Amino acid sequence: MSDSGRVFVGLPAPAELQESVLRFARRYPALPFRWIAPEHLHVTIVPPWQCPDSGPVCMRIFETASAFAPFSLGFDTVSAGPHRRTPRLLWATAPAPSLLLSLRQALSGLSAAQQGGERGFLLHMTVARFRPEAAAGLPLEPCGVSWSGIFDRICLYESLPNPSGVTYRELCSAGFGKASAFPGN
C-alpha cells in the first residue's frame, strides 16, 4: 500500500443513499451532467493531498474507525457548487453534525490540506459534474431533498484521472466500531 498518489479520506455512500441519487438522476436525463457512478459516491472527510506512503495513513484510519460506531448522515439540499458564479458540480449538502466534526478531528494532521480547521468544512456529497459553460440556462436552483443513510466504514481513496471523469480506488477500508488489526501487522 505504498507509493500512493493523490489521496483523500472519505465515507463511501451506503446503498440507500446511492439509490436516492439514482432516483434523482433519473428525473433529469436530458441535463448535460456526468452523474457520479453509485460506487464512487462518498463524503470527503480529509481533502486530497499527495501521499507518498499510504501505510501509516491506513493504520491511523483503522485506529480511528474502531473508536466510532456506525452513524446516520442526512442531506437536505441538492445545489450547484462549489462557487455560485462558476458552478461545475451538483452536490447534496447539509449542516455537519458534531459527530462528523469529531471524526475529522480524530484524523487531524493527516494532510496539510486539512489545516484550515472545522470552520470551512461543508458536509457534501458530489452527485454530478458538468462543464461551467454548460451551466448557462440550466435549472440550478437549490432543491430540497430528504436523503439519509447509515455510514459504517471509512476509506482511504486514491484519485485516478480518467478521460470520462475522475474515478477512485480504495487503498484501505475500516469498519466503524470494529476492533480489527491493520493488515500487515
Image: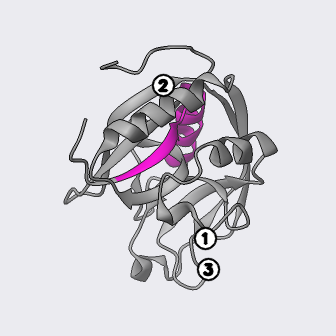
**In the rendered image, which quarter is residue 124 located in?**
bottom right
The three-letter code of the residue at mark 2 reads Ala
Q: Which residue is mark 1?
A: 140
Q: Position of residue 183 (x, y in %)?
A: 34, 19
What is the crowding at mark 1: few (fewer than 14 residues within 10 Å), some, or many (at least 20)?
Answer: some
Mark 2 residue element: strand
Up-down: is 98 above or below 78? above
Mark 1 residue element: loop
Mark sitting earlier along the chain (1/3) = 3
Q: How is the image coloured?
A: one colour
Up-down: is 167 above or below 86? above
Mark 3 residue element: loop
Q: Position of residue 58 (x, y in %)?
A: 41, 35
Residue at 53% over, 52% down? 46
First to last magenta residue range? 7-25
Q: Position of residue 126 (x, y in %)?
A: 52, 54
Q: Marks 1 and 2: CB-CB under 8 Å?
A: no
The three-letter code of the residue at mark 1 reads Leu
- 30 or 147: which is nearer to us? 147
Q: Which residue is mark 2?
A: 174
**Cα distance in 3D space between marks 1 and 3:** 10 Å
Mark sitting earlier along the chain (3/2) = 3
Q: Which residue is mark 3?
A: 84
